[in-house]
Every structure is written in C-alpha cells, then in structure tokens.
Amino acid sequence: MKYSCVFTIFCFLSFSGLSAQNLFKSFYFQMPIDDAKAILNKNSKTLKKLSFGNGTNYSFRNRSFVQRDNKLVSINIWSKQNLTLLEATNYLKNTRSHFESQNYKVVYAQENWSNPNLIMKNLPGVRFVDEDKTVLIELYPRGQGTVYNVFVTFYNYDWFIKRARGQ
C-alpha cells in the first residue's frame, strides 16, 4: 500500500510536469522528435486543418518541427494555402483575436503587426504568453507582391527566454 501511494504521487507529479511543458495538443517540449513525427503521421488529417480564428486554416507540414539533439523545441504551423494581402491581413487579425480569447496575453506587438507590407521582417508581428507562462506563441506574415503566408510558432516559454538572453 505504501509503495502504491508513492508510485501514484510520483506518476501524478510526472504527468503534471509533463502537461506544463505542452506546446500544442499532444506535442510537448523536449519530446523525442521521432515521437512528434509519429503523432503527426497518425493525426495528419486533423493537423492539416487547424483553425485559430474565424476564416483561418492552418496546417502542420513535414518541416513544422524544430529540433535540437533530436528533441522537439518548437513547432511552426502556417496558413494552408497562399494568401492575398487582404487575406493575410484578415488571418493576422482573426488569429490574434482567437489567442486573446483563449486568455493568451500579448507581450509584444509591432506597430504595423497586421500589415504584411509594413511589418519589420526580422521580428514577429505579435507575441503571446499563456497565463502560466509555459508557452510563448509568435504570429507573423511572410511574403511579398501577391503571395503571403501567415505563421504561428509555439515555444516553451522558459527555453525561449533563456535563448533570448543567450544562455
């Protein structure tokens, strides 16, 4: 009895710590990259039709995972199809509204965050942090002329802060 209680507490603490590291759905920070790829393969239909706001359609791609030492460190998801300038602007506005409605707090936004032609290319358009400061999300457009895409990147908050500080 004593050992089963210890085991139960250990499992609870282990899974609690794991859930605090979630990046998106079943993906978690530092998971083996092969496990992340297996989840993508198993759930490819649902992970290629994600909505983060009215009229948005995002998709995982084969290059969605960023890894270090065969461990998942961030996830990049982008608009399923190429967008016009107007569509990209609407995607940005609707996606921002979606994350704010999910209690993500905006911690950074460029002045022209919703205009792909005026955004500073070396910076994200908007950065969000969840209430527990475990996930940082970046939202930004890329493209020019008549073809644009909107990207959403998920990071582990602590890992991102350490990298930003050069640690």
Image (cartoon, rainbow, N blue to C red):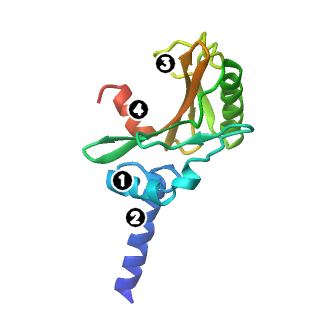
On-image quarter of the C terminus:
top left
Q: Nearer the viewer, residue 35 or 29?
A: 35
Instruction: Give the label, 4 or 1, closer to the camera.
Output: 1
How far apart are the alpha carbons under marks 1 and 3? 27 Å
For the residue labelled by badge 3, is the local secondary structure a helix, a strand or a loop? Answer: loop
Residue marked by disc 4: 161
**Amino acid at circle 2:** Ser
Residue marked by disc 3: 123
Pick out the residue farthest to the left: 69
Image quadrant assignment for residue 1:
bottom left
Residue marked by disc 1: 31
Look at 34% across and 84% down and name the residue there: 3
Q: Is residue 151 above or below residue 111?
A: below
**Amino acid at circle 4:** Ile
* Upstream in sequence: badge 4 or badge 1: 1
Q: Which mark is residue 14?
A: 2
